[in-house]
Image (cartoon, helix red, strand yellow):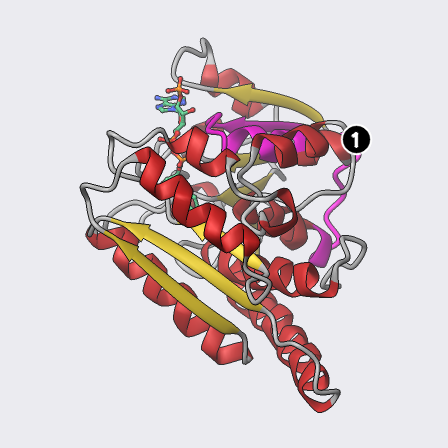
Amino acid sequence: MTSILIDGKTVSEKIKSKIRNSISILEKEKKQIPSLATILVGEDSSSVTYVNMKIKACEYVGMKSKLIKLPQSTSTEQLIAEIEKLNQDENIDGILLQHPCPKHIDERLAFDSISVDKDVDGVTTHSFGKLSMGEKSFLPCTPYGILLLLKEYKIPISGKNTVIVGRSPILGKPMAMLLLNEDATVTICHSKTKNLPEIVKNSDIVVGALGKPEFIQKDWIKRGAVLLDAGYNPGNVGDIDIKNGSAFSSYHTPVPGGVGPMTIAVLLWQTLLSRKKTLQEHPF
Ligand code: NAP
């Protein structure tokens, strides 16, 4: 079976070019340009890399960005005070708190202090509640990026057996809600799940979201399944054995160049929507 490659890089470029066009119109009309504030606590090297990528992406589409670097020793209260300042700042449309924060910080409390109107990374309990209720909200960027890939490739979701391997608040759980809202039959798996291979074998759509290199094996894949790999492990390896598993799939995302590029594009898209004060638009 020939598996179609889902080209997240190209799809993300399409979204970024749409953002760039919208921003140039705002500029011509002498309107306020969208602005994203990113908070980085400490100096975790992967986080520094991700933050730099986000700042570069803002520049690329003509969006403003502001980086707030806080020392490793920052307390939860100090972090929340910084977030509050950004909540009040009319020049800021979106707030991104880079995850993970140092261990001593109450990350949930910090996320939940982000104003829902500026929660362009979709991390607050409020946004998750709205998503779970099927209401409009800003969405967690990686799951929303995965959904957009399915839409762009016109892959049917309604009624499909879907498995998400991983249940983190930023990835697995919201992914499940997004697919449920699209009328999929959703199974969420985690580290205590029994019979994972059989569950995957019964699934038309498989989302790898656990952070374990090539954990989902080729023998588990149902013939014709759609493989979506959110995992990003050292050595550019995903959570699904795509190399061998794609012999059985109908569609698959590569790593890198699949899900990864979508995350930043969606973040910028939602920052643009925040400036435009709408949740009604989709990039395509
Ligand atoms: P996380 O918070 O560590 O969550 C991992 C999840 O996987 C947990 O729910 C855990 O179950 C589950 N899990 C762990 N071992 C398992 C096993 N043996 N069998 C079944 N489930 C297992 O990770 P995350 O932040 O969601 O990230 C997951 C992966 O996605 C990572 O590779 C990360 O780099 C990647 N990611 C990529 C992007 C992107 O932009 N492309 C964005 C976010 C994350 P328990 O709940 O039972 O512990």
Q: Mark 1: is the Cβ under 8 angstroms from ligand 1? A: no
Measured along the vertical axis of the image, is residue 65 above or below residue 247? Answer: below
Measured along the vertical axis of the image, is residue 19 above or below residue 179? Answer: below
Please state the quadrant of the image where ligand 1 appears.
Answer: top left
* Residue 143 falls left or right of residue 182: left
The residue singled out by tag 1 in the image is: 183
Name the residue rendered at 49%, 54% in the picture: 86
Occupied quadrant, residue 239: top left
Q: Which residues are magenta?
A: 151-177
- Whether residue 3 is in magenta: the answer is no
Q: Position of residue 37 (x, y in %)?
A: 46, 60
* Residue 38 falls left or right of residue 139: left
Name the residue rendered at 40%, 49% in the picture: 82
Measured along the vertical axis of the image, is residue 280 above or below residue 123? Answer: below
Q: Position of residue 124 (x, y in %)?
A: 56, 36
Name the residue rendered at 37%, 66% in the picture: 53
* Residue 251 falls left or right of residue 242: right
What amino acid is at disc 1? Asp
Occupied quadrant, residue 218: top left
Q: Residue 22 versus residue 158: which sits nearer the camera?
A: 22
* Residue 145 falls left or right of residue 29: left
Number of residue marks: 1
Q: Position of residue 161 (x, y in %)?
A: 68, 26
Q: Is residue 214 visible?
A: no
Occupied quadrant, residue 202: top right
Name the residue rendered at 59%, 72% in the picture: 16
Q: Position of residue 162 (x, y in %)?
A: 64, 29
Measured along the vertical axis of the image, is residue 9 above or below residue 222? Answer: below
Quadrant including the C terminus: bottom right
Q: Residue 52 versus residue 71: which sits nearer the camera?
A: 71
Q: Residues within 10 Å of mark 1 (few under 14, many from 20)?
A: some
